[in-house]
Amino acid sequence: MRLLPLALLCALACRPTDRYEGLQARLTSRLSQVPGASLGVYVRDLTDESEFAFNADTLFHAASTMKVPVMIEYFRALDDGRLKPDAVTLLENRFASIVDSSSYSLDAGEDSDSALYARAGSSVPVRELVERMITRSSNLATNAVIALVGASRAQATARALGARDILVRRGVEDDKAFERGLNNATTARDLGMLLEAIVEDRAASPEGAREMLAILERQEFNDEIPAGLPSGTRVAHKTGQISGVLHDAAIVFPPEGRAPFILVILTGGMPDEKVARALIQDVSRAVWDTVMEP
């Protein structure tokens, strides 16, 4: 049996661990500058299949990152014929609480896609709702899609893809469920598993996975992970935000033919979103520096 040179063995086996030790120290130092903050980070470099985890298995309120498994379930529904590509649905601002089926409505003023509310009462293509759910983080579109594909099915599919702890329980602004602690939740690793499944064409059919990737690339809110990366870096991602919580989950495409890497950053405990955003940007920059170092 031919023995590999020591230098090559280290390149294959040692380098990922060594480089991530420096990242661990860098993130620990940065987090210490924000008392009371919580941070979960998951990195998966598809070039060498190495990974880095920093509180990556800690559950956070998912906020709008839960829209990723809902999108996946929509494309699964296309694959198995539950929905047609040209399906339309009557858009209504009325939904049933998971607690007691009582009716509730969404507040357009609290939605990042308030323009969609003007179309309530009319038929809207489901595919358009999925697009707006991701690119504009539309809450109204999200609840309409969940009503079609089912939160429980979205959770089951996500777990089958490796997101072992994710909770997809309900739509947005179900206050009765919120009061009982029945929230959507995720870990950084869970979201990383889903993004990896998308980029590897495993989340749905290859055609569906490519469509999902394209939708994520059209994300309109780019002040978190993309802002910490070199200008012009290709990123497919989904953000999430509620009071004291700010997240971003991304597939990052480096230049020069390198394979992409998965980067998920979850934060909590920071009421000032500017502070949380600066933390995410700094983590994003630190991960880029680490993954791209020679």
Image: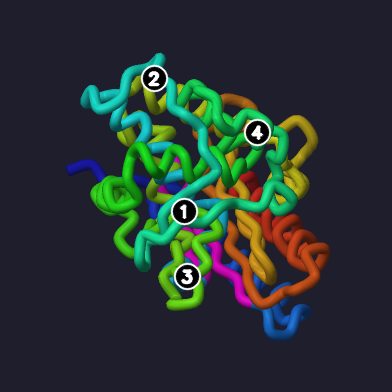
- Which quarter shows the C terminus? top right
Which type of secondary structure does the marked residue at label 1 adopt?
A: loop
Residue bounds of the magenta highlight = 38-54
| Residue 74 seen in this snapshot | yes
C-alpha separation, residue under disc 4 versus residue under disc 1 = 17 Å
Decide: is 289 above or below 279: above
54 to the left or right of 77 = right
The percent coordinates of residue 80 (x first, y second) are 21, 26
Looking at the rendered structure, the kind of residue marked 3 is Lys
* In contact (CB < 8 Å): disc 3 and disc 4: no
> For residue 32, which quarter of the picture?
bottom right
C-alpha separation, residue under disc 3 versus residue under disc 4 = 24 Å
The residue under label 1 is 171
Nearer to me, 164 or 47: 164
Decide: is 56 above or below 38: above
Residue 87: mark in rendering? 2
C-alpha separation, residue under disc 2 versus residue under disc 1 = 21 Å
Decide: is 35 above or below 6: below
The answer to if 42 sits in the magenta stretch is yes
C-alpha separation, residue under disc 3 versus residue under disc 2 = 31 Å
